[in-house]
Each structure stands twice: as C-alpha cells, then as structure tokens.
C-alpha cells in the first residue's frame, strides 16, 4: 500500500507529484537500482522512447518529468518527478495516469546497453570534480562498515553481469518489498489521493530502518592521494551526537556555512590560508563536512586551526547564536520559493519519520539554547587530502 502526503500550496500554478521508491542502501543492489532509474525514465509500453515521452509532455503545456537516484541517509531512493501547470484540465489525472504507465508498465525487457553506458559515464564522472571526489572518498573510508559508504549511483564493475532479465526480476521484487510514498505539492485534494491509491496497488508498509547507533569517538584516520592537480584539497569529516538534527545544523551556521562564520573569518580572512572553505551537514547521519582548497604545505596548520575552532564551539556568544538562528531560519524560509526545495525539505522529514511543518521546525530552532549547543561536541573522524603530484 502506497503512502500519500499532500502539501497544499497554490502559489506556483503547478501540480507536482513526486514518487519515492525507498530502498535500504545495499552494495549488492545499488547498481541495479541506479540502472533502473535510467531505464524507467527512457520509456514505457505506452510511451516507448524519449521522443514519445517528450511529445506527451509538450501536449501538456510543457510538463516536466524526470527519474533519478537520490541518496538520503542510509537509503537509496528511485525518485519520479512530474510537474504540470494547473491550466491543464484534470491535470492531476494526467499526472497520475502518466506515472502509472511509467512505473507499472516499463520496458525493461529491451536492450539496456545504452543505459549501461550512460550509467558507466556517470560513475566515471565522479573523478571530474576533485572536491566532490575527495568528499566521496572521505565518506567511503570513514563509513566503510556502514551503508552510508555505498555509492548510490552504483559501481562500474557490476554492470557487465546485469541482464534485462535480472533487472526485470529485481524491479518486480522492489515494487512488492519497498516503502513507496507519493508527495503532492500544489492544490492537493482528496481526489488526487483517492486516484493514487486506486491506481497503485504496490509497496509495503515497512520503511528502511533509521541509523540508531550513536557515534563513539575514535582515533582520527588520515588519508592522502597524489594527483595531477594545481592546488591541494582537504576534507575533514566530523561526527556528533546532537540532541536533534537542528542543533547540529545551527552549529554549522556558526562554524562554516556563512561569510560571518568562524571558519571563514579565522582561516580565510585572518590567516589568509585557503582559497575556499565551507562546512555542511549530512542529514540522518549527523556527519559534518569541512572542505577547503589550499596549498598542501599548509595542511597541518589548517587542521590545527580547525581543531581549535571546533573546540571553541564549546564557548559561544549570544550574538553568534542569534545570528546563526536568523541565518538558518532565513535559509529554511527560502525553501518555500520552489517546489524542488519544498520536496527536498519534506522528503528528508518523511524519511526521518518526522512530520514537522516548516513553522514547527522554525519554532524548534528558536527554542534551542546556547547551553544546548555548547554541550554538543563534534569529533573529527577522518582527515582526507589531495596533494599535487611532484
């Protein structure tokens, strides 16, 4: 039985339907699921190729359709996205009927060579952006015994053994054994929910489990690669056990998310040590990433400064906390400016088993105290670097 979430919002003049097929991240099926996303998005029995899909979308005043793989915490999600303008009569019927054709009547029994090549190219493109590559390697090493280390876009070595028969059998299985959720943004109405539930007799009620094991500090791991690059890059992966995710998100605002943050003011402006520096948080894993570009001869000094700054988060000022709250709340309010941001916000909430609306989240953030933040230690787990080859 599918689950339906209705989010009333009429300011976009569109109806957006997002379908999540939720799978626990597993090495043995990550490539299968990634390949499925490409195959499912390239045609179905009624619309047998991309050109026929595009013709249908054009006839619906330029509706938008996409299928992609999304990694959220320890879940790998096949996500279908359909957006249609509300001037289309019975637009919600068109949306649900189109998604029904794509999801329930796919063309998996055809040659999948092209989609294999497309996926192979995406996998190989991990190496193109060296900052992103270093971040991915840091996660892979630090979380090697956790599902979070698994690449959601799969592995090149798995592609050769995947046949359309194997892919089709796997898809039939995940339609039965996955938690499947619909998120509808727009003029949501009871008719939409009824049509979804009457059209999709798939899925199960059991969602993938949330990671529950608290992090225990351990010896810091060091990792380095020498590559043909012009400047060094560093990625520091740290962990925390905060009272809530929003505590860590607020600490990140103070640490390195804004131009007034400690990382930027101390390392970039005062020490003039790096070209770029920032920090961000992986939700559902309580992982904080600090990354920068700088000359490799300054790595050790950078690390020492970061350690001092993290230690300094145990002593905050009222001004920093108030400024962090204001910045974070302003960022969250911007999520209402686009349907994609709204979907990302609520998707993360649903996966975490939370039902908070944006106003409730803002209330939670405003209620966080300076003392609570100061009692949320952050531990460096791994330091990963890329150095220019000599």
Image (cartoon, helix red, strand yellow):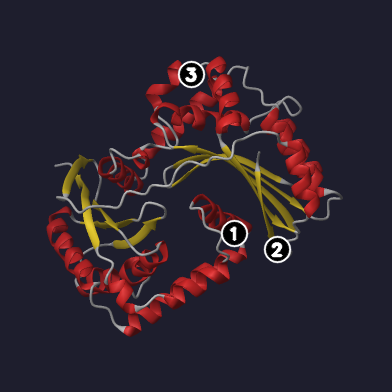
Q: CA distance from mark 1 to mark 2?
A: 10 Å
Q: Residues within 10 Å of mark 1 (few under 14, many from 20)?
A: some
Quadrant (top left, top right, bottom left, bottom right) of the N terminus: top right
Does dot 2 land on a helix, a strand or a loop? loop
Q: CA distance from mark 3 to mark 1?
A: 35 Å
Mark closer to the chain start, 3 or 1: 3
Quadrant (top left, top right, bottom left, bottom right) of the C terminus: top left
Residue 186 figure quarter = bottom right
Q: Residues within 10 Å of mark 2 (few under 14, many from 20)?
A: some
94 relative to 216, above or below: above
Which residue lies at the image location 39% right of the left edge and 63% below the top edge?
A: 244
Which residue lies at the image location 21% right of the left edge and 73% below the top edge?
A: 312
Disc tally is 3
Residue 9 numbered tag: 2
Residue 162 numbered tag: 3
Q: Left of 319 or right of it: where is 269?
A: left
Q: CA distance from mark 3 to mark 2?
A: 42 Å
Decide which of 365, 229 is in the foreground and name it: 365
Mark closer to the chain start, 1 or 2: 2
Which residue lies at the image location 85% right of the left edge and 49% below the top edge?
A: 90
Decide which of 73, 259 is in the foreground and name it: 73
Q: Left of 206 or right of it: where is 95?
A: right
Q: Are marks 1 and 2 in contact (CB under 8 Å)?
A: yes
Is residue 272 visible in the rendered image? The answer is no
Among all residues in the image, which is located at the extreme right? 89
Question: Which residue is disc 1 drawn over?
Answer: 342
Residue 291 figure quarter = bottom left
Q: Are marks 3 and 1 in contact (CB under 8 Å)?
A: no
Q: Residues within 10 Å of mark 3 (few under 14, many from 20)?
A: some
Which residue lies at the image location 71% right of the left edge and 38% below the top edge?
A: 99
């Amino acid at each position: 039985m599918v689950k339906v979430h209705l989010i009333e919002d009429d300011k976009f003049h569109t109806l957006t339907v997002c379908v999540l097929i939720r799978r626990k991240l597993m090495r043995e099926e990550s490539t299968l699921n990634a390949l499925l996303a490409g195959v499912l998005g390239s045609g179905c029995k009624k619309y047998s190729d991309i050109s026929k899909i595009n013709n249908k979308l054009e006839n619906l005043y330029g509706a938008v359709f996409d299928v992609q793989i999304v990694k959220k915490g320890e879940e790998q999600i096949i996500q279908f996205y359909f957006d249609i303008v509300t001037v289309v009569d019975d637009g919600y019927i068109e949306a649900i009927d189109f998604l029904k054709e794509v999801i329930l009547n796919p063309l998996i029994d055809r040659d999948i060579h092209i989609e294999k090549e497309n996926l192979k190219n995406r996998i190989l493109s991990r190496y193109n952006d060296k900052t992103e590559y270093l971040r991915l390697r840091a996660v892979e090493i630090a979380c090697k015994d956790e599902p979070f280390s698994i690449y959601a876009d799969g592995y090149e070595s798995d592609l050769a053994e995947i046949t359309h028969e194997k892919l089709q059998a796997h898809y039939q299985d995940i339609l039965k054994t996955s938690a499947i959720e619909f998120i509808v943004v727009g003029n949501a109405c009871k008719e939409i929910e009824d049509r979804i539930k009457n059209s999709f007799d798939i899925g199960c009620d059991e969602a993938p489990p949330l990671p529950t094991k608290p992090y225990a500090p351990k010896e810091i791991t060091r990792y380095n690669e020498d590559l043909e690059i012009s400047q060094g890059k560093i990625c520091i992966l740290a962990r925390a056990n905060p009272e809530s995710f929003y505590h860590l998100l607020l600490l990140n605002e103070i640490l390195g998310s804004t131009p007034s943050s400690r990382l930027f003011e101390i390392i970039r402006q005062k020490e003039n040590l790096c070209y770029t520096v920032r920090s961000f948080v992986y939700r559902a894993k309580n992982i904080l990433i600090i990354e920068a570009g700088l000359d490799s001869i300054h790595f050790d000094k950078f690390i020492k400064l970061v350690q001092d700054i993290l230690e300094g988060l145990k002593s905050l000022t009222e001004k920093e906390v108030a400024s962090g709250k204001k910045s974070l709340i302003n960022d969250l309010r911007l999520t209402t400016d686009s349907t994609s941001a709204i979907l990302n916000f609520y998707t993360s909430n649903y996966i975490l088993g939370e039902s908070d609306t944006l106003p409730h989240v803002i209330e939670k953030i405003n209620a966080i105290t300076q003392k609570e933040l100061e009692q949320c230690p952050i531990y460096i787990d791994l330091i990963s670097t890329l150095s220019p080859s000599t």
